[in-house]
Image: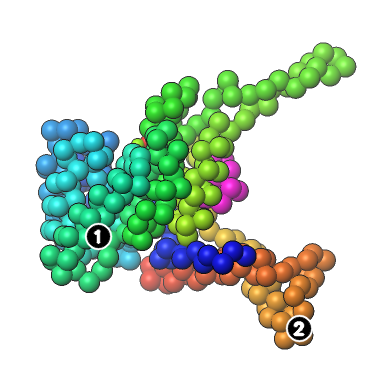
Amino acid sequence: MSFKIIEQAQARLNRSELAVPGSSPRFFERAAKSDADVIFLDLEDAVAPDDKPKARKNIIKALNEIDWGDKTMSVRINGLDTHYMYRDVVDVVEQAGERLDLIMIPKVGTAADVYAIDMLVTQIEDAKGYKKRIGFEHIIETALGMQNVHEIASASNRNESLHFGVADYAASTRARTTNIGGVNSDYAVLTDPDESGSRDIHWGDMWHYAIARMVVAARANGLRPIDGPFGDFSDPEGYKASGRRAAALGIEGKWAIHPSQIELASEIFSPTKEETTKAKRIIAAMKQAEREGKGAVALDGRLIDIASVRQAEVMVTKAKLISGRNRTRGRDSK
Ligand code: GLV
Ligand code: MG
């Protein structure tokens, strides 16, 4: 283990993150009653330029007046290359900063982008005398952001999560895609011919490098890596496959661009009962080994050591957060 200790961002459930356009207040109440872990009210791409001032007002009113329960609330501001951004931050944080947990910064490209927003938010928080500090979620969705993802991840102690914004990332890298977050049949290889001369096509995951790179930057800085949108909301199987392959790489949650995707994300990113039970057994077995002065033990015929315990602890912590949330919503906890 390195001498450097990685500080972990505040622990929050972030299995699903529901996107709600700030210009559509008719969706707000329904979002507040949904099972989403995090909601981001959008001022950026879902809002047309002429609607930005009204959307800001809607969001401020909604943050102050709607009962969002125990949800983590975020606002996606406009990019630093637009003149909307400063007013998004100033108006929303000044007028609704107490119910705001996170600010989502789109198209972040450099550590200096993070520094600039940090400075602005710090001044507003100080001037208003807020006790709580607002965290940052960054969308990595440009070639520049992906190049600088490591510096971005460590640019502020407000940072909580990195999100892979596949739609803008495809535009920025000029990747050829068909639908948002989906696959492209051109990203494939042909197997060698078998005896009968027939060949198979093996599709690949064209987003593998980007997601894996972002996961490393997030985890090396104690942040949550989150996968972004899957555009075809009439394809739950496609969404689940996309979420599962991201989870396999260490991703902790996924955007829901439609309410129907919330439940899918919760299912994919919650540990199962079996996984939680196993994790608890690993922790117990390791405690027993420690008492006996052993560094590693076998459980169910497999070696477990300190690294297995750390993984198990992460899982048990998440299971506790989930069961706490289920209790406050009057549901049986898994
Ligand atoms: C999200 O903002 C994306 O561009 O995918
Ligand atoms: Mg985007």
Q: How many marks?
A: 2
Who is closer to the viewer here, 116 or 171?
A: 116
Question: Magenta region: which residues?
Answer: 241-251
Number of the label disc, if any, that sits on residue 149: none
- Which quadrant contains ligand 2? top left
Left or right: where 222 falls relative to 171: right
Is 243 a magenta residue? yes
Identify the residue at image location x=48%, y=22%: 176
Number of the label disc, if any, that sits on residue 293: 2
| Callout 1: SS | loop
Identify the residue at image location x=56%, y=51%: 250
Distance between the alpha carbons at the discs numbered 1 and 2: 47 Å
Q: Which percent across, then down, holds residue 230?
A: 44, 37
Q: Which percent across, then down, holds residue 325?
A: 42, 68
Q: Amino acid at mark 2?
A: Gly
Residue 218 appears in the figure? yes
Badge 1 crowding class, 10 Å Cα cut-off, few under 14, some 14 to 19, many 20 or more, is: many
**Which quadrant: the N terminus?**
bottom right
**Which quadrant: the C terminus?**
bottom right
Q: Amino acid at mark 1?
A: Leu
Badge 2 crowding class, 10 Å Cα cut-off, few under 14, some 14 to 19, many 20 or more, is: few
Assign the magenta stretch its main secondary structure: helix
Q: Which percent across, then down, holds residue 86?
A: 16, 46
Who is closer to the viewer here, 197 or 294?
A: 294
| Contact between labelled residues 2 and 1, with CB atoms less than 8 Å apart | no
The mark closer to the camera, 1 or 2, is 2
Number of the label disc, if any, that sits on residue 100: 1
Where, by quadrant of the figure, is residue 300 drawn? Answer: bottom right
